[in-house]
Image: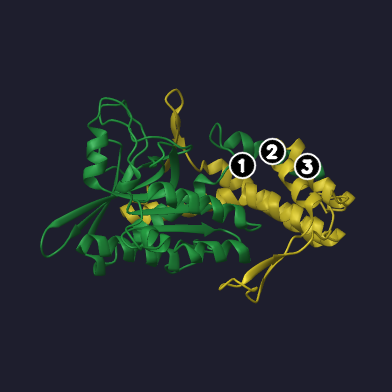
Amino acid sequence: MHYKIDPRAEDVVRVAEQGGFPGLADEIRSVLFTGRISEELESPADGYDAPRVRISDPQPYDAEEQFDIALDMLVSATIGRVRLLKAAEDRLKDVTDNPKARLMEWVDPEVGAVPAVPDDAVRIADKLEHLLGLARNMRTLDSLPSKGS
Amino acid sequence: MRTEIIDLLTQLGAALPPGFAFNKAGTAYEALVALSVAYQFKSPYYRTTVEVCDHTGTPASHFVIRQSPGKIHPATANAPRPGFIRLTFHGRRAKRVYEIHNSVQFKGRSGSNHEQDVSVIAQKTGDDLRNLPGDGRPSGKDLKVAVECKDIPKGAGVGIARGSVGNAFDLSPNRSRGGSYKQAFSKTRMFAVTVLGGMSVGGTQVLDYYGINVYANANLTAPGPHPLIVDVAARIHEDMKR
């Protein structure tokens, strides 16, 4: 069963798609389509010595939850990963006692190794975080204030 | 303003390394786990020298991590290739040396290969593979510690736990007579799953039952050592003293 996606959450999904992350957009849609499935432990049934896990039927997320989930997933897959890489690079500096140490990512024999966290990515992630933070507060991507306001 | 967000996402995609996969398990999280374990060994308590190395084993200031599952490259391969972190334990009896790798595939008992997001092996295993003429994979029996790093902020479910049990099963020796799977998976080695978000009740139950450590909501960017890091370091330290 697929639940309906609220227009504001769908808006976030489209932004991810148009921003060049179609796989992420599919993943967000899939989570919202599926709804919430919860698990809880129950007392052991006859013939078992361990508690059993009861899995609930899926329940739809409400519109506000959908918007938050879509935004959370967008933030973590973009800004979140840049932040993790930056944290890893900072830890590398601590490990090597070398403030100039860089974390490199080996892609393949033709590309070789490239900086895992380019300075540009950190700068862009900062700006993106600001805008998505505003969107979260306004509860929509529509009514964000323009740059000059 | 929607346009501005789309523009920034496009710019971010362009700024990141080619092939940087947003929907795959995060290399970023693996790197953070591997380096956090290494950093833990900088404490004088462990009497260990920590060195970031290139693929030949020469100390380096840059750390090259694998972006996708792979093998250990021969020392004769052209640089740069994925490196590793060397831990040299200065014990009372003898020097013991270990290596921390990311995204290396290990050969299972079935003959199938299994990627370990963060793994710890003895230096001898690494040296043997680096001395081969081509790329090579360690075997499950060489594994000291394996950490499955799940960069899933929304949380992981029982499917992840099932996969981890299968992974531990194929990479562990046969059970000794009367021994449990839990013993086979955790007596002389450590399997762990760490998740950026939560782990479902069912997933936790499965992992606990089989002696696979689980760490939920493990965002390692907070100050101070996370229990995952403390436990991994303790397991390696125990092996060092053996």
- Same chain? Circles 1 and 3: no
> Mark 1 highlights which residue?
B22
Residue B43 occupies quadrant: bottom left
Q: Which mark is residue B193?
A: none
Q: Residues within 10 Å of mark 1 (few under 14, many from 20)?
A: some
* Position of B204 relative to A32 (above/below): below
Residue under the point 32% across and 40% down: B138
The quarter of the picture where residue B181 lies is: bottom left
Q: Earlier in the sequence, mark 2 or mark 3?
A: 3
Q: Extreme bottom residue here?
A: A43
Image coordinates of residue B176 in percent, x first then y, are: 32, 58
Q: Which residue is mark 2?
A: A23
The answer to whether residue A129 of the structure is visible from this angle is: yes
Looking at the image, is mark 1 or mark 3 nearer the viewer?
1
Q: Quadrant of the C terminus of chain B?
A: bottom left
In the rendered image of this protein, does residue A116 appear above or below residue B154? above
Amino acid type at image mark 1: Phe
Cβ atoms under marks 1 and 2 closer than 8 Å: yes
Chain of the residue where label 3 is placed in the rendered structure: A
Residues packed near mark 2 inside 10 Å, few (<14), some (14 to 19) or many (20 plus) = some
Check the rendered structure and report the hue given to chain A.
yellow
Asked whether, in this view, residue A51 is left or right of residue B116, the answer is right
How far apart in space, not on screen, are marks 2 and 3 (Cα)? 12 Å
The answer to whether marks 1 and 3 mark residues whose Cβ atoms lie closer than 8 Å is: no
For image coordinates 63% across by 58% down, the residue present is B155
- Work out whether residue B204 or residue A66 is closer to the camera in this orientation and state it: B204
Residue drawn at (79%, 59%) of the image: A58
**Disc 2 and disc 3 in contact, CB within 8 angstroms:** no
Q: Secondary structure at mark 3?
A: helix
The residue lying furthest to the front in this view is A47
x and y percentages locating residue A101 in the rendered image: 37, 46
